[in-house]
């Protein structure tokens, strides 16, 4: 049903006409047609008008809430897709413009469209005057506002230009973070602006201007909208630089008309710069990756270009490039830092080009900017998928009554199979504080955010789920047939520790056969995994991974299953199997040995055998159980296993009698 046409309310249906239909049926149709939110009340109203039973009405209410939640998620995804599509469309539009005024108008118009604001405008810095001035507006009605000039540090825009950081205010006149002046406040008041977002136009390490989006009412700009406008501003700065470069080139060609040879040489360089800009824009539009950018620049510059992670790039050259904002020479190579704000994401390294034309140098720098845009877009998409995986795991842990069918559908969207056996893992960085709440990490929880990011990436590569909980991370990972939870815990502890460069302690649960069929089992398994994790810390084994089976008789207390037979078999199975095969009495000898205070002399009297026979039997036990079987810890486990074995045998005899 279209959003802009209200649906008529059908007359009440007979009470038994829909009582047998699934409660989700009417809402699935609404989801399929993209109905407005208010339409989701109609099935409940029809059922209530038709005299439906209270249970039916309650089921419809639950289904309605689930459908509205799905609708919200779908709308969020459509919004994110629309934002990325609009960003790519912007890149395409700007790539086709060569006139600076046209570029600036397109930037401001697209900024207003991207954020859906009433006004958008752009200021440029005036190096000669040492201030910044209004250059282009879209949606503005005030002549005074359109002619404003701001000193560095004055007003929100002056603060952005001075600090090279985005700033946002929900209510301009009540915000004391920046310096208000009568001139600026009068212009803003004439325009009627209230909520303002400003992001810097960065070229290298310098700010060339500020891009704004504003509303005439109070409005909260979400972090995603700030990032979107910042990404647009990054590409806009490249477009402005390209337009300025082309304008300068045209002027140079006019002034040097007589120097045809020089013009031809410079023209080839300019064509190469324009070609690489167009090619990089095309790569962004078609969804290319970082390696595609490196390959394109390598072909244009006729060299070997490689993207390297921050830790693998030449450290000194990377620091100079980051500070200077330009590609720098490193021996026979050139290094251009790939950065987003103050964060260094890596570097583009051009090898074997000790002499690089300035325009080719700028080409390498533009490629680094495009690479940062691609990495940020990939990070945004990855974080969105991480949140979806975390929300699904939170639902498994917190809501045991979830509909298995809906759980399977949500899991399928992220590539997880909740009908296969899984293991629950509880992980925490050594010394990390325990949070008093669940959900995504708070902005100040740097350690939790790093752990969440590493755990989410690991879960995604294994078609599992991950979430932040209780000051650590919880993972739900598929378990291969015959897989060992303890081995999985040790592997995950090692991988997370390597990724984070700090010890990570991981506890594992017993296998969960089918999480979708029994969501409550996931919460129980998480509790067991946490007990194992805390036991590791209490035993001084932080930074390791283990399951209940690794703790011997202590595992009986940690595990939910209380697998007594498994404990006895792990402890004494080798001796019992030997007795069964050879008809020996090693178990009886072992029991008598401990009962006699571990004295061979008293043991031989108890068993009525020669002391050499006792010694031979104990030597055989040592070969079966290992050389440390008489140490205090092992001896305690063996004695407990013997008692449990004797009790089990007694119960079996009584049952048979």
Image (cartoon, grey):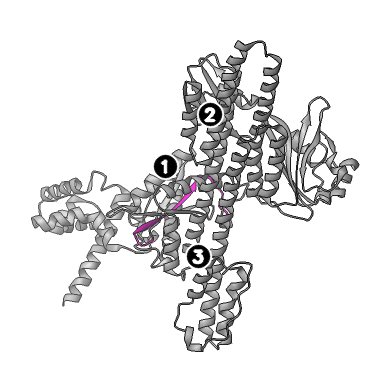
Any part of residue 539 in sight: no
Mark 1 crowdedness (10 Å alpha carbons): few <14, some 14-19, many ≥20: some
Residue beneath the point at 85% across and 39% down? 147
Could you tell me which secondary element the residue under label 1 belongs to? Answer: helix
Horizontal and vertical percent position of residue 571: 25, 54
Give the label, 1 or 2, closer to the camera: 2
Q: Which mark is residue 398?
A: 3
Label 2 or label 3, whichever comes before in sequence order: 2
Between 263 and 585, the one lying in front of the other is 263
Between 381 and 512, the one lying in front of the other is 381
Could you tell me which secondary element the residue under label 3 belongs to? Answer: helix
Between 192 and 410, the one lying in front of the other is 192
Horizontal and vertical percent position of residue 478: 36, 54
Residue beneath the point at 61% across and 23% down? 320
Could you tell me which secondary element the residue under label 2 belongs to? Answer: strand
Mark 1 to mark 3 CA distance (whole Å): 27 Å
Q: Which mark is residue 327?
A: none
Label 1 or label 2, whichever comes before in sequence order: 2
Mark 2 to mark 3 CA distance (whole Å): 43 Å
Mark 2 crowdedness (10 Å alpha carbons): few <14, some 14-19, many ≥20: many
Q: Which residues are magenta?
A: 418-435
Q: Which mark is residue 495?
A: 1
Mark 1 to mark 2 CA distance (whole Å): 25 Å
272 magenta-colored: no
Quadrant in which the N terminus appears: bottom right
Give the label, 2 or 3, closer to the camera: 2
Provide the residue designation for mark 2. Answer: 347
Look at the numbered discs 1 and 3 and tell me whether their residues touch, using CB distance below 8 Å: no
Between 105 and 133, the one lying in front of the other is 105
Look at the numbered discs 2 and 3 and tell me whether their residues touch, using CB distance below 8 Å: no
Horizontal and vertical percent position of residue 144: 88, 43
Mark 3 crowdedness (10 Å alpha carbons): few <14, some 14-19, many ≥20: some
């Amino acid at each position: 049903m279209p959003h802009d046409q209200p649906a008529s309310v059908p007359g009440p249906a007979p009470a038994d006409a829909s009582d047998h239909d699934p409660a989700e049926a009417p809402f699935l149709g609404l989801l399929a047609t993209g109905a407005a939110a208010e339409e989701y009340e109609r099935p409940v109203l029809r059922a209530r008008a038709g005299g439906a039973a209270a249970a039916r009405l309650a089921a419809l209410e639950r289904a309605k809430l689930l459908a509205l939640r799905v609708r919200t998620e779908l709308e969020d995804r459509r919004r994110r897709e629309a934002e990325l599509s609009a960003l790519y469309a912007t890149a395409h539009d700007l790539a086709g413009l060569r006139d600076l005024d046209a570029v600036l108008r397109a930037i401001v118009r697209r900024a207003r469209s991207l954020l859906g604001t009433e006004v958008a405008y752009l200021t440029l810095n005036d190096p000669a005057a040492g201030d910044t001035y209004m250059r282009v507006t879209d949606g503005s009605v005030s002549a005074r506002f359109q002619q404003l000039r701001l000193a560095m540090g004055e007003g929100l825009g002056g603060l952005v230009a001075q600090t090279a950081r985005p700033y946002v205010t929900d209510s301009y006149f009540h915000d004391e973070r920046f310096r208000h002046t009568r001139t600026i406040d009068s212009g803003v008041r004439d325009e009627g602006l209230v909520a303002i977002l400003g992001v810097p136009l960065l070229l290298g390490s310098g700010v060339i201007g500020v891009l704004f989006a504003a509303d005439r009412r109070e409005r909260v700009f979400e972090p995603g909208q700030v990032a979107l406008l910042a990404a647009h501003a990054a590409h806009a700065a490249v477009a402005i630089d390209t337009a300025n470069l082309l304008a300068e080139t045209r002027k140079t060609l006019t002034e040097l008309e007589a120097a045809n040879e020089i013009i031809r040489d410079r023209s080839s360089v300019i064509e190469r710069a324009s070609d690489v800009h167009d090619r990089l824009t095309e790569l962004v539009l078609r969804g290319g990756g970082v390696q595609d950018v490196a390959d394109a620049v390598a072909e244009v510059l006729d060299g070997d270009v490689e993207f390297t992670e921050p830790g693998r790039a030449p450290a000194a050259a990377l620091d100079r490039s980051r500070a200077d904002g330009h590609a720098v020479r490193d021996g026979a190579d050139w290094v251009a830092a790939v950065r987003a704000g103050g964060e260094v994401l890596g570097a583009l390294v051009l090898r074997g080009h000790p002499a690089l034309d300035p325009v080719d140098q700028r080409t390498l720098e533009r490629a680094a900017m495009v690479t940062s845009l691609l990495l940020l877009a990939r990070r945004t998409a990855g974080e969105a998928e991480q949140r979806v995986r975390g929300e699904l795991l939170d639902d498994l842990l917190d809501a045991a009554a979830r509909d298995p069918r809906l759980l399977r559908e949500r899991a399928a969207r992220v590539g997880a199979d909740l009908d296969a056996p899984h293991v629950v893992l509880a992980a925490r960085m050594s010394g990390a504080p325990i949070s008093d709440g669940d959900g995504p990490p708070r902005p100040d929880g740097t350690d939790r955010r790093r752990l969440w990011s590493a755990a989410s990436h690991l879960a995604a590569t294994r078609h599992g789920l991950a979430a932040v909980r209780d000051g650590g991370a919880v993972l739900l990972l598929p378990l291969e047939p015959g897989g060992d939870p303890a081995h999985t815990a040790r592997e995950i502890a090692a991988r997370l520790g390597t990724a984070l460069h700090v010890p990570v302690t991981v506890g594992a649960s017993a296998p969960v056969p089918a999480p979708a069929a029994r969501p409550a089992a996931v919460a129980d398994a998480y509790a067991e995994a946490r007990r194992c994790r805390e036991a590791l810390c209490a035993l001084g084994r932080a930074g390791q991974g283990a399951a209940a089976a690794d703790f011997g008789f202590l595992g009986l207390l940690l595990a939910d299953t209380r697998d007594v037979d498994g404990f006895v078999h792990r402890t004494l199975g080798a001796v019992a199997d030997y007795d069964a095969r050879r008809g020996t009495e090693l178990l009886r000898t072992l029991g008598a040995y401990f009962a006699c205070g571990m004295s061979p002399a008293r043991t031989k009297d108890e068993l009525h055998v020669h002391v050499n026979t006792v010694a031979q039997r104990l030597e055989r036990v040592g070969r079966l159980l290992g050389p440390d079987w008489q140490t205090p810890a092992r001896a305690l486990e063996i004695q407990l296993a013997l008692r449990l074995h004797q009790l089990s045998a007694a119960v079996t005899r009584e049952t048979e009698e």
